[in-house]
Every structure is written in C-alpha cells, then in structure tokens.
Image (cartoon, rainbow, N blue to C red):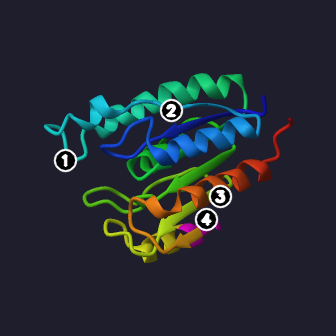
Amino acid sequence: MRGHCILSHGFESGPDATKVTALADVAERLGWTHERPDYTDLDARREITPLGDVPARVARLLGLAQAAAARGPLVLAGSSLGAYISGHVSLQVPVVGLFLMAPPVVMEGAPPMPASEVPTSILHGWHDELIPAARVVDWAAARSARLLLVNDSHRLSDHVQASADAFAQLLASLAVPA
C-alpha cells in the first residue's frame, strides 16, 4: 500500500458519483487504498444553510482523515463542496497531496478556501456557472498548484476521464514509497 485517499463527493451528489468512482478506480490501480464518505444525510439538512451542514461535513472528514493519517500517507480529493472541506481538513491533518475538482475557492459569506501547502492538482471548467474560472486561476497561482482548465461546466461531466488522468498524475508524482 502506498497510502490512502479519501474521496469526497459534491453537494447533493453521493459516494457512488461518477467522478469519485473514477478516482477510486485510479487509486486502486496505483496501489492506494481509498474510501468515499457519504455526506448525503448532511446535505439534506438545509435548515442549517442552503448547502446543508457544512461544519458536520468537515467534522466527518476530519475524523476519517485523522485515523487514515495515523496509518500512513494521505491524499484528500473532492469535488465542489467536497473540495472545499478537503482544503479545510488539510490544515488540520498531515496530507501529502490534494486533488480538487471545481473547487469553490470563494463562497458568499465565507473566507477564501483554505488549504495546506502540499502538492495540489485542480481540474476546473472554463464555463463553471458557480465558481468563475478566473478566481480558481488566481487561487491556484498563489500556491503554484497544477491547474487544468477544461471546456466544461461546474459538474465536469464531459471530463470524467480527464479528472481520472489528472488524479493519476498527482498520485504518481508524490514521493511515497511503494
């Protein structure tokens, strides 16, 4: 085992979503264990915010990440709100890499998305209707992250394979013993 990946789905998605399933396949093929937490119960809690219970999402991922990091190298990956919570948790748990798809680097009423200074790879759509590409470019540039901008919307549904390929590149680039 090279390490462990925690793959967090986006808001109103699920652990069997197409993109996180593709990432799980890549992790397994490259010798990484993986898990896909289910946040659907927290997303349904709209009485807290329009995005559900975000603090509880962070807490759930934090618990899983702490346990995984105690066993070895950890990579956090996420799509949209899953990317946002991955960034937050990366500041509280040692991670060796971050993979962020359609990251909400700026959300109304929240500070810019925080994240650990580790190797980071980002996939974002030029035509993302929720998070302007220019903001993601600025956020990525400030941390010298690898950034792939594609001709797609927020869901990145036309770039599932590109997501998997970019994730494979990140995992292969990490200096983790086999």
Using the numbered discs, state the Cα–Cα distance from disc 3 to disc 2 in whole angstroms: 18 Å
Using the numbered discs, state the Cα–Cα distance from disc 3 to disc 1 in whole angstroms: 30 Å
Report the residue marked by disc 2: 36
Crowdedness of circle 2 by 10 Å Cα count: few (<14), some, many (20+)?
many
Q: Earlier in the sequence, mark 4 or mark 2?
A: 2
Q: Amino acid at mark 1?
A: Pro
> Which label number is shown at residue 166?
3
Task: Write the residue at 53% across / 52% down.
Answer: 115
In this picture, is 137 found above or below 157? below
Crowdedness of circle 1 by 10 Å Cα count: few (<14), some, many (20+)?
few
Query: At numbered mark 3, what does the secondary structure look like: helix, strand or loop?
Result: helix
Task: Write the residue at 38% across / 69% down.
Answer: 128
Query: At numbered mark 4, what does the secondary structure look like: helix, strand or loop?
Result: loop
Tell me if residue 142 is in the magenta stretch: yes
Q: Is residue 72 visible?
A: yes
The extreme left residue here reads 47
> Which label number is shown at residue 50?
1
Report the residue marked by disc 4: 143
Q: Amino acid at mark 3?
A: Ala
Q: Earlier in the sequence, mark 3 or mark 1?
A: 1
In this picture, is 140 found above or below 84? below
